[in-house]
Image (spheres, coloured by chain):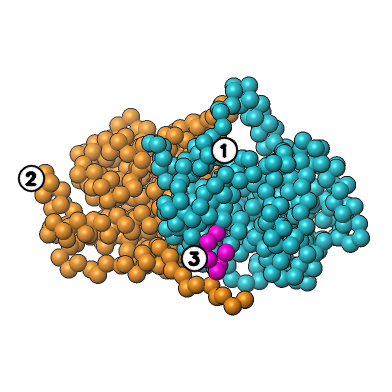
Amino acid sequence: MSETPRPTTDARRTFFAARPTAGATVDLGVSIGGLRLLNPVMPASGCFGPALGRLIPVDELGAVVTKTVFGVPRGGNPAHRLTEIRAGMVNSVGIPSRGAAGYLAELHPHYRALGPPVIISVGAHRPNGYAPVVRDLGAAGDAYELNVSCPNLDRDGTDIGSDPDAIESAVAAVRLETDKPIIVKLPVLASSIAECAQAAQAAGADAVCVANSIPALPLEAYTRAPAIGNVIGGLSGPSIRPIVLRLVWLAARSVDIPVIACGGIETADDALDYFSVGASAVQVGTASFARPFAMVEIVRTLQQRCTDDRVAGIRDLIDLWRAQ
Amino acid sequence: MSPMKTPPTAAETRAALARQAAFAAADAAALDGLLSVRPPEAGPRPEPVWDEATVVSHEVVRERYRRLTLSCGTIAATALAGQFLMITVPPHGGERILLPRPMAIHRRNPLRGTIEVIYGVAGRGTTALAAVTPGQRLLVTGPLGRGFEFPAGTRRALMIGRGVGVCAVMGSVEDAEARGIRATLVASGRTRGSLIGAAECAELGARFIPVTDEEGSADLPALGALLRSEFAAGPPDVVFVCGAGVLTRLAAELGAEWGVPVQASLEAHMACGLGYCHGCAAPVRTDPAVEGPLVCVDGPVFDAAV
Ligand SMILES: Cc1cc2nc3c(=O)[nH]c(=O)nc-3n(C[C@H](O)[C@H](O)[C@H](O)COP(=O)(O)OP(=O)(O)OC[C@H]3O[C@@H](n4cnc5c(N)ncnc54)[C@H](O)[C@@H]3O)c2cc1C
Ligand SMILES: Cc1cc2nc3c(=O)[nH]c(=O)nc-3n(C[C@H](O)[C@H](O)[C@H](O)COP(=O)(O)O)c2cc1C
Ligand code: FES
């Protein structure tokens, strides 16, 4: 054939090339315990993996967060593991895990190679189950996020994180195992998010993450059969944002440690909503599926907003609007 | 775009749903114990990209499907037969679609920098997708997954597709033409008017065999007999199949009789398409304490053998 394929480019390539040159006066940095992050934007556990590094410049993120790691290997739930209903996304993946040893051998090097600090999410079935996993992971993580709030482990969708005493004992035990920052990821369905956050703080946590997905039961249209294999799953996406905003507001008023907001964040404005009610950092989950570049776009937009308004950081940006 | 037909009556909807439920149950049962992950491919997989693809055209085809032609040069130039895309569906009429939808790459035209996708309007996602108009830009990610591969020395290949499943095997019909492999495509569907692939096979010089439920020719015993006689003189060197578990089982049985390998493309609910959300567990039997293969990265094409 005489024709040759025309040279091509694509939006991914253009996006990589558009890396902003560091604005000298803008500092989006944030500290979680002793860990300094370049900016307050990171993925939500389970909605990220090293494979996403093929699509976006992951090194522009403040941190990366692993899928929850359990002590011993787990297989995960039967199909369907996820679906979409009008109210949002529902997943019941069931946290398949290679166990701590499998994570360290097979996955950790790939997370480490991405560049940003690696926050390892840790799971267990009982409050005393977290410390042994953190011990096994040793110094691998730059911080540990305790997932005490997965709606998918037990069929009724309740969790350790709705009980302040259970949180306190889990965190206290982990505190003895590591000097690295501890983040506690709280559930939506706690009778008092303030008491849960305070329990985490009292036991030595360095931050709380608010929140996980919301237990839900999606049905198929017409047949009304359960739409996912586990029957109950976790609702996520933009519809949960106002629910989680309230929880972040309540948590931020009740503790001194930073609150990391997680729930339905898609844009820089969504992130600013959370910052305005007291969040110090944000995690992005569901939004990355439809728009893989969403997290990096949020970082770049926050930088640009600060530059445009000639302010040094996000707090000033929010104060500026409050003053107007 | 032509307007949708009159909405189905309650009885029609119930009948359609009962058919779907029976189909899904038969499908899962038929696949049980059939599938395994293919051995590592010979060459590297193309790097996936995301792109703002321009909609070149969007039209109704074959009674019940829509063809979307997209301009996205990198994907058109690199996609392998049997790979797929994740299409982010733009909001429509106040409906927001959160998860991108996986779609097989039906045709690749690297010279024009375009690809074609054919889909059926099924639920909210594809209903919103049907509202997309030419000139609009769609966010797509691809090419993704493990496609079909001809074993070395293949001279004759049999492709079998059910409904829109024909699209998953069409890339390999394209490749067959380019490599001098004689391809036979069996398109199975409810009615003649719904079958995809006749025009494509005419263009690509492949043999096209239509079989339908309404004529009885798509029934498994009839189809099995047809294929045994079609290949009585000499079997194909490989069979590719997509679109129904029962067809995959038939293909695997024929493959065993003929002593040739069978590859099957699967569907699963997906969020990321890249292997990190763990949403797309494949129906492959494994140790329950160990996560099984994922359709998006270990497939969608698997080996099928009885
Ligand atoms: C690798 C692959 C290739 C595909 N290629 C094609 C194709 O070429 N043409 C085509 O018409 N369809 C194809 N599909 C199926 C297509 O993605 C679904 O039919 C479609 O998502 C369901 O229609 P909807 O979005 O309108 O349904 P909705 O009711 O909006 O879907 C609800 C949820 O269920 C999921 N879902 C429902 N049915 C399916 C299904 N069969 N497969 C995967 N997810 C499903 C959706 O992704 C969504 O998360 C493919 C699927 C996969 C996995
Ligand atoms: C597919 C999927 C898998 C998830 N896996 C985990 C997990 O392993 N551990 C965890 O703590 N949270 C997990 N989550 C919850 C998210 O981290 C996040 O808390 C939730 O989705 C709300 O944020 P979003 O609305 O931005 O998605 C998962 C969510 C999804 C959608
Ligand atoms: S779709 Fe996310 S792992 Fe397969």
Number of dots carrying numbers: 3
Q: Are marks 3 and 2 in contact (CB under 8 Å)?
A: no
Task: Identify which amino acid the numbered label 2 is placed on.
Answer: Ala
Picture layout, residue B188 above or below residue B104 = above
Q: Are marks 1 and 3 on the same chain?
A: yes
Rendered hue of chain A is orange
Q: How far is disc 3 from disc 2 in space, using C-alphas?
A: 49 Å
Q: Residue B262 location, x and y as percent?
A: 76, 57
Q: Which mark is residue A323?
A: 2
Q: Earlier in the sequence, mark 1 or mark 3?
A: 3
Rendered hue of chain B is cyan
Front of the two marks 3 and 2: 3
Q: Are marks 1 and 2 in contact (CB under 8 Å)?
A: no
Q: How far is disc 1 from disc 3 in space, using C-alphas?
A: 28 Å
Residue pointed to by mark 1 = B122
Q: Which residues are magenta?
A: B109-115
Q: How far is disc 1 from disc 2 in space, using C-alphas?
A: 50 Å
Q: Residue A282 location, x and y as percent?
A: 30, 50
**Residue pictured at 64% horizontal, 44% vertical:** B62
Mark 1: C-beta under 8 Å from nearest atom of ligand 1: yes
Q: Which mark is residue B73?
A: 3
Residue A222 or A72: which is nearer the viewer?
Answer: A222
Residue A38 or B117: which is nearer the viewer?
Answer: B117
Q: Chain of mark 3?
A: B
Q: Which mark is residue A4?
A: none
Element under disc 2:
helix
Residue A171 or B63: which is nearer the viewer?
Answer: B63
Q: Are marks 1 and 2 on the same chain?
A: no
Q: In this view, which residue lies farthest toward the left?
A: A323
B217 lies left or right of A153: right
